[in-house]
Amino acid sequence: MVLSTGINKIRTAVFISGTGSNLKSLIKFSKTNKSPISIVLVISNNSEAKGLDYAKKNNIKKKVLNFGNKKLTENNLISILKKNNIQMICLAGFMKILSKNFLNKFKGKILNIHPSLLPKYKGLDTHKRVLNNKEKYSGCTVHFVNDRLDSGKIIMQKKVKISKKETETSLAKKILTQEHKLYPKAIVKLFSL
Ligand code: GRF
């Protein structure tokens, strides 16, 4: 990645839609010495997203954007990101698909976390599909975002074993715990490359 950490940390925006447990873990990580990033902005498409509370608690600027008109919203979003000198974007449970135009503006600077061992199980309902297929393992992946769903270059993965009594809920919980560790690790890896 062609971003230099220098003395100043990488100004990062996190995009969320819901619970925001990955946002919470990224905020915690960003306050450590190990972190090359500083989270300065949280974007949500959902005003009810619980994750917005973490932004508030940590005095991080937040914006809620209703993606009703995608083109207009993305243009607004691009100007918000530019105004805040955002250098990197972490998608964390963000449920909107970003357009090619938007992605081109932040080429190679958008990361995502997905709850499967990509390239397997792209898209939604991953845990259900994994269990239906009687997989022995699943996991999570941090990857770059490109214009194909969950298909950008993989940065890091963590595998988890599926137990005999696994349910969708237990698997989601097991993987989410690993996501909270993997996202910070992948960011450290990215900036030490
Ligand atoms: C995570 O499982 C993430 O991998 C997926 O959406 C979920 C978001 O969880 N993209 P949270 O909002 O970070 O708690």
Image (cartoon, rainbow, N blue to C red):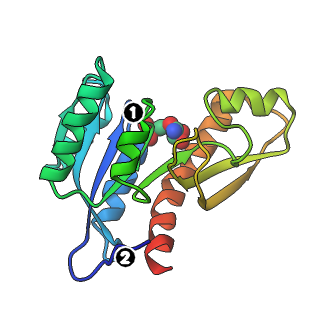
What amino acid is found at the position of numbered circle 2 in the picture? Lys
Q: Residue at 70% of width from left, 48% of height from top?
A: 117
Residue 157 makes an appearance in the image = yes
The residue located at (35%, 73%) in the rendering is 3
In the rendered view, would you say 25 is above or below 124?
below
Q: Which residue lies most toward the top here?
A: 68
User: Which mark, by number, is residue 19?
Assistant: 1
Identify the element where label 2 is drawn.
loop
On the question of residue 52 being in view, the answer is no
Quadrant (top left/top right/bottom left/bottom right) for the N terminus: bottom left
| Disc 1 element | loop
Q: Is residue 50 left or right of residue 168?
A: left
Of residues 10 and 168, the one nearer the viewer is: 10
Image coords of residue 81 (percent x, y): 21, 48
State the image coordinates of residue 130 (x, y, percent, origin top left): 77, 34
Mark drawn on residue 34: 2
- Asked if the residue at label 1 sits under 8 Å from ligand 1, the reply is yes
Give percent across and percent down for residue 23.
36, 47
Task: Find the distance from the CA under tag 1 to the CA under tag 2.
Answer: 25 Å
Where on the picture, by quarter, is residue 127?
A: top right
Name the side, left or right, on which 31 lies relative to 29. left
Ligand 1 near label 2 (Cβ, under 8 Å)?
A: no
Badge 1: residue crowd in 10 Å (few <14, some 14–19, many ≥20): some
Which amino acid type corresponds to the residue marked 1 in the rendered image? Thr
* Vertical order, 17 against 78 (above or below): above
Residue 190 percent coordinates (x, y): 48, 71
Describe residue 3's horizontal placement relative to residue 53 as left or right: right
Identify which residue is drawn at 23% across, 35% down. 75
Q: Nearer the viewer, residue 149 or 71?
A: 71
Circles 1 and 2, Cβ within 8 Å, touching? The answer is no
Q: Which mark is residue 51?
A: none
